[in-house]
Image (spheres, rainbow, N blue to C red):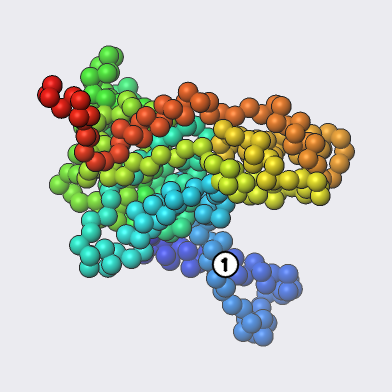
Amino acid sequence: HGFVGADVNALCKEAAMKALRRYLPDLTSEDEIPQEIIDQMQVMGADFEEALKEIEPSAMREVLVEVPRVNWTDMGGLGALKQELIESIEWPIKQPEKFQKMGIRPPKGILLYGPPGTGKTMIAQAVANETNANFISIRGPQMLSKWVGESEKAIREIFRKARQVSPAIIFFDELDSIAPMRGMDEGGRVMERVVNQLLAELDGLEALKDVVVIAATNRPDILDPALLRSGRFDRMLLVGPPDRQGRHEILKIHASRTPKGEDVSLEELAELTDGYVGSDLDNLCREAAMLALREGLDRVEMRHYREALKKVRPSVEEQMLSYYERIGERFKGGIKVEPASLAGYR
């Protein structure tokens, strides 16, 4: 996506050069290459994949971001959230004809909110990788400029590039830093203009065809309410701390990178790590491996994990969890039914 003719030409040439380098050890210092070696030369798919790492699409040169190779298999503890993401993003991009047949408009925006360390950024990267879409990653604070109009221009340029190279996924990390509730900005009206520009791009005159906006935030309560209506951020998904089964899945992924002793019980660790999020469990496995390394051992034993538990504390506390649960209740649909005892006082 986003490759013009000259880019495709450069890609083919680079792939041919990669193939030629594979045959260089078989060549002598003679001026002419023997015909039998020329007949054997083939450009393989792997050569094109290597060339893709070096040739950038012209239309994405200003905003292209290298996406880590993150798959759904690299992530655990998502549960039903994974299915919702696949339905909201993967299906509209991979099977648009089914959505047209059913008369369904795919969601424009998806807001991921939850405590820090639950893997919101990693989820966006996995979605982009699974859909083979161009991934434009924007960190909220980098949009802000001291020059009047520059911040709004940056938002316009991002959406313009995304339309050019669709299918594309725009990922806004720390959305609350650029789209707070209007009227909260005491140092001027910069934030209000940025929010207005973002609203105009999300449902303006130019349709966002095959462009999905994903945003992540730890503070959904301070976002401007106009962003959260249907037609802008259609789906608001809580990425909370994993349950016991989810922690077991995450531990299995992180612990598989290091050799383990026979006494290591991941089920027991999953029980002991209540309140731990993905980043905490990653840190726990790393700390246990360092303790084993310090003792000169070539495998991690259960005692190392127990010792690491004393150093790595959980990120999510009960108070923080109740805060996100209250916000989740506020975002839920349905009609609020008042108690019968209060019905006569309306």
Question: Where does the N terminus fall, quadrant-wise?
Answer: bottom left
Q: Is residue 230 left or right of residue 44?
A: left
Q: Is residue 223 above or below residue 214?
A: above
Q: Tell me: residue 302, above or below residue 324.
A: below
**Between 133 and 152, the one nearer to me in the picture:** 133
Residue 103 at x, y = what percent? 20, 62
Q: Residues within 10 Å of mark 1 (few under 14, many from 20)?
A: many
Q: Using residue 299 as the reference point, say whether residue 277 is left or right of it.
A: left
Label 1 is placed on what type of residue?
Asp
Residue 83 seen by the camera: yes
Rendered residue at 20%/25% (across/down): 341
Residue 45 in the image, given as x and y percentages of width and height:
55, 71
The residue shown at (47%, 23%) is 319
Residue drawn at point x = 58 percent, y = 67 percent: 46
| Residue identified by numbered label 1 | 47
| Residue 137 location (% of width, % of height) | 42, 42
Is residue 142 shown to the viewer in this render? no
**Residue 147 as seen in the image, left or right of residue 121:** left
The total number of labels drawn is 1
**Looking at the image, is 137 positioned above or below residue 21?**
above
73 to the left or right of 65: right
Q: Residue furthest right?
A: 296
- Report which quarter residue 218 is drawn in: top left
Name the foreground residue: 117 vs 329. Answer: 329
- Where residue 302 appears, as percent x and y from the top left, is 78, 40
Which of the 4 image quarters holds residue 304? top right
Q: Quadrant of residue 41?
A: bottom right
Locate the C terminus and report the quarter of the image it occupies: top left
Element type where label 1 sits in the image: helix
